[in-house]
Image (cartoon, helix red, strand yellow):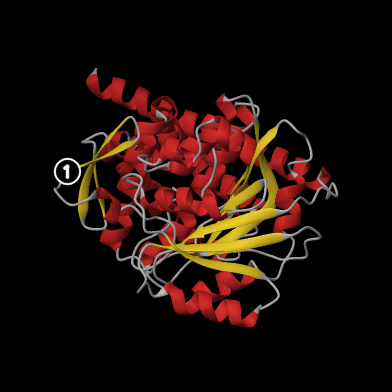
């Protein structure tokens, strides 16, 4: 009897996962259709790009440089912020300033600490230096095309829009952890974002790849200070702007992010940190992720009923649905050129995702730069005597990943 109940439960979960795949396909199609109808509105207000950074990697200069090569008719400035006057990013920014003397680029040492999340603390400082009524925040490893600013800022033509955000795809390093992370971004994370956008009839959160905001919306929610103790600051900013009565729009442009050369352990620790962060920030939606893991549930069903024809049938259906969903989101929507190379890793990625989801409920602590924190309603509570601010960057790259997921 117990075995039959288990088989029935796994069958239902597998069918739910298959259904989610089809919903994600439809959601991605709806986004592509809406993106295809979008055209530049001609709205090109002056904008300040705020980039809190810490350290650099081999791709940092090209990422920074891409922001200076914009086909944008409006004015814009770029303000980089670092915590330490000896930061390795400083000579890289100085090189950028030398290459683009006509571009308004500034470097600011953010000496004040306003809360646990040093990225947001830096943004609070940088906002004082911004001179325009619109600001864009994105991570230090984001690569953008020349149409980026035009696409993003066009979204503010309707006065009701308070935030514009962007999907992103990864540029993996050679390690298995990096490739699994990139695959998850394109086939799992992006699919979830587009499904939430479709099911909720609009976005209710932001993505750290791009957080473009009007000052009026930002001021209405209390500025960056309101989220300075939150790890998922991008999510919180978008949620609060939506709750304040503004629209959060998803731009048609897709940006790139360089993914760190994770070891498998580092990959797992990052997944756990992201999972517990989202569980704390969006508990209902996060619990619902249990209904999205078609392949892992189908594999467990096959183990529970190895000789049943229907368990094999559901496994085949799950594989077909998952592959179709991945193609729809990663290939057709994000144009992820690494998808075909790493497609064979998709079942492993999904099994690990289910394991991460389960393990995320085993506690509320996370590791961030070698220090432990406890999450409470999305807030960071340090579990050590060290100042929490020295550990919560997420804005750029040294040995840690950006804080988008």
Q: Residue furthest left?
A: 385
Task: Relative to 211, say whether 375 is above or below.
Answer: above
* Closer to us: 269 or 238: 238
* Closer to us: 73 or 310: 73
Task: Relative to 68, say whether 48 is above or below.
Answer: above
Q: Residue furthest top?
A: 1
Within 10 Å of disc 1 (Cα), the crowding (few <14, some 14-19, many 20+) is some
Residue sitting at x 53%, y 45%: 207
* Closer to us: 273 or 69: 69
Total count of labels: 1
Question: In screen coordinates, is 239 left or right of 149?
Answer: left
What secondary structure is found at the residue carrying circle 1? loop
Task: Relative to 215, say whether 377 is above or below.
Answer: above
Task: Relative to 206, say whether 74 is above or below.
Answer: below
* Quadrant occupied by the N terminus: top left
Residue 274, x across and y down, in percent: 36, 45
* Closer to us: 293 or 127: 127
Residue sitting at x 21%, y 36%: 363
**Image quadrant where residue 161 sits:** top right
User: Residue at label 1?
Assistant: 383
Residue 270, x across and y down, in percent: 33, 53
Question: From where the camera sits, is residue 98 visible?
Answer: yes
Residue 391, x across and y down, in percent: 28, 55
Question: From where the camera sits, is residue 306 visible?
Answer: no
Question: In screen coordinates, is 150 left or right of 329?
Answer: right
Residue sitting at x 36%, y 53%: 112
């Amino acid at each position: 009897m117990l075995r039959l109940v288990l088989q029935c439960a796994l069958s239902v979960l597998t069918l739910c996962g298959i259904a989610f795949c089809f919903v994600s396909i439809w959601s991605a199609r709806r986004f592509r259709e809406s993106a295809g109808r979008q055209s530049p509105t001609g709205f090109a207000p002056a904008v300040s790009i705020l980039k809190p950074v810490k350290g650099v990697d081999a791709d940092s200069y090209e990422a920074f440089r891409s922001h200076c090569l914009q086909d944008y008719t409006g004015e814009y400035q770029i303000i980089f912020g670092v915590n330490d006057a000896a930061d390795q990013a400083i000579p890289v920014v100085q090189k950028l300033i030398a290459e683009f003397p006509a571009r308004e680029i500034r470097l600011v040492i953010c000496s004040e600490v306003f809360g646990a999340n040093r990225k947001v603390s830096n943004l609070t400082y940088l906002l004082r230096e911004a001179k325009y009524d619109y600001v864009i925040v994105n991570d230090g490893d984001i690569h953008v095309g020349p149409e980026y600013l035009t696409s993003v800022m066009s979204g503010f033509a309707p006065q009701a829009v308070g935030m514009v955000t962007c999907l992103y795809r990864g540029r993996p390093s050679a390690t298995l952890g990096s490739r699994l992370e990139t695959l998850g971004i394109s086939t799992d994370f992006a699919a979830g974002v587009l499904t939430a956008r479709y099911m909720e009839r609009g976005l209710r959160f932001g993505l750290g790849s791009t957080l473009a905001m009007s000052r009026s919306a930002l001021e209405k929610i209390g500025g960056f200070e309101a989220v300075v103790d939150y790890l998922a600051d991008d999510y919180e900013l978008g949620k609060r702007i939506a709750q304040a009565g503004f629209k959060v729009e998803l731009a048609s442009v897709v940006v790139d992010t360089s993914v760190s050369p994770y070891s498998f352990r580092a990959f797992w620790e990052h997944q756990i940190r992201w999972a517990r962060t989202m569980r704390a920030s969006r508990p209902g939606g996060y619990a619902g992720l249990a209904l999205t893991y078609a392949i892992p549930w189908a594999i467990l069903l096959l183990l529970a009923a190895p000789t049943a024809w229907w368990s094999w049938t559901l496994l085949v259906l799950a594989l077909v649905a998952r592959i179709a969903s991945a193609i729809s989101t990663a290939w057709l929507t994000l144009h992820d050129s690494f998808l075909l190379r790493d497609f064979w890793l998709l079942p492993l990625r999904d099994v690990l995702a289910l394991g991460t989801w389960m393990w995320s409920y085993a506690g509320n602590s996370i590791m961030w730069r070698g220090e432990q924190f406890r999450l409470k309603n999305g807030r960071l509570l340090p579990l050590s005597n060290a100042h929490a601010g020295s550990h919560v960057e997420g804005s750029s790259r040294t040995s840690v990943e950006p804080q988008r997921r």
